[in-house]
Image (spheres, rainbow, N blue to C red):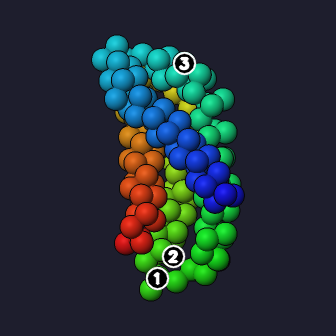
Amino acid sequence: MLYHTLLLLHVLGACVWVGGHLILSLQIVPKALLKKDVQLIQQFEKTFEPVGIPSLLVQIITGVWMAILQYGILFSWDNAVQRNIIIKLSLLVLSLLLALHARIFIIPKLSIDNLPLMVLHIRFITLVALLMVFFGLQFRFGGL
């Protein structure tokens, strides 16, 4: 029962995280680019962050917990499930690095001049989130 509860929380967190980034990438970013208005992105970030960050934390905690509970802490590229875990953890690190870079170097000085760089970060983080969903689904089928 614990595993099912963790999985439910993990999937709910993914729905919020991925859904929010899809809305940002497909709705907010095109409007911001068209209107040349960085405030649209800043407003979305202020609204989404209080929900998005906790959902990401829930995913990290439940994901690691499920991996340990179900598969142990072995990191072997020879095992399909372990390979999936390594890939998902690598994607998580990539997400965190992109987010830190944006938070430190782009967001404090966000303007129309560096909006394209911010958009690139948003699109990459959205892609990484979608890849994490893809690799998460692979657990159902035994990994890659």
Q: Residue at x 65, y 51 (%)?
A: 5
Q: Secondary structure at mark 3?
A: helix
Q: Answer yes or no: is residue 20 visible.
A: yes
Vertical order, 44 against 22 (above or below): above
The three-letter code of the residue at mark 3 reads Gln
Q: Residue at x 36, y 23 (%)?
A: 27
Q: Dot 2 corresponds to which residue?
A: 82
Q: Judge the density around disc 1: few (<14), some (14-19), many (≥20) Cα neighbours within 10 Å.
A: some
Q: Answer yes or no: is residue 118 visible.
A: no
Q: CA distance from mark 1 to mark 2?
A: 5 Å
| Discs 1, 2 touching: Cβ within 8 Å | yes
The three-letter code of the residue at mark 1 reads Asn
> Where is residue 28 shown, x and y percent of the image?
40, 22
Q: CA distance from mark 1 to mark 3?
A: 44 Å
Quadrant of the drawing holding the N terminus: bottom right
Q: Residue furthest bottom?
A: 78
Q: Dot 3 corresponds to which residue?
A: 43
- Apparent side of residue 77 relative to residue 105 in the rendered image (left or right): left
Nearer to the camera, 85 or 117: 85
Q: Dot 1 corresponds to which residue?
A: 79
Judged by depth in the image, the label closer to the viewer, 2 or 3, is: 2
Disc marking residue 117: none
Q: Residue furthest top?
A: 35
The three-letter code of the residue at mark 2 reads Gln
N-term-proximal mark, 1 vs 3: 3
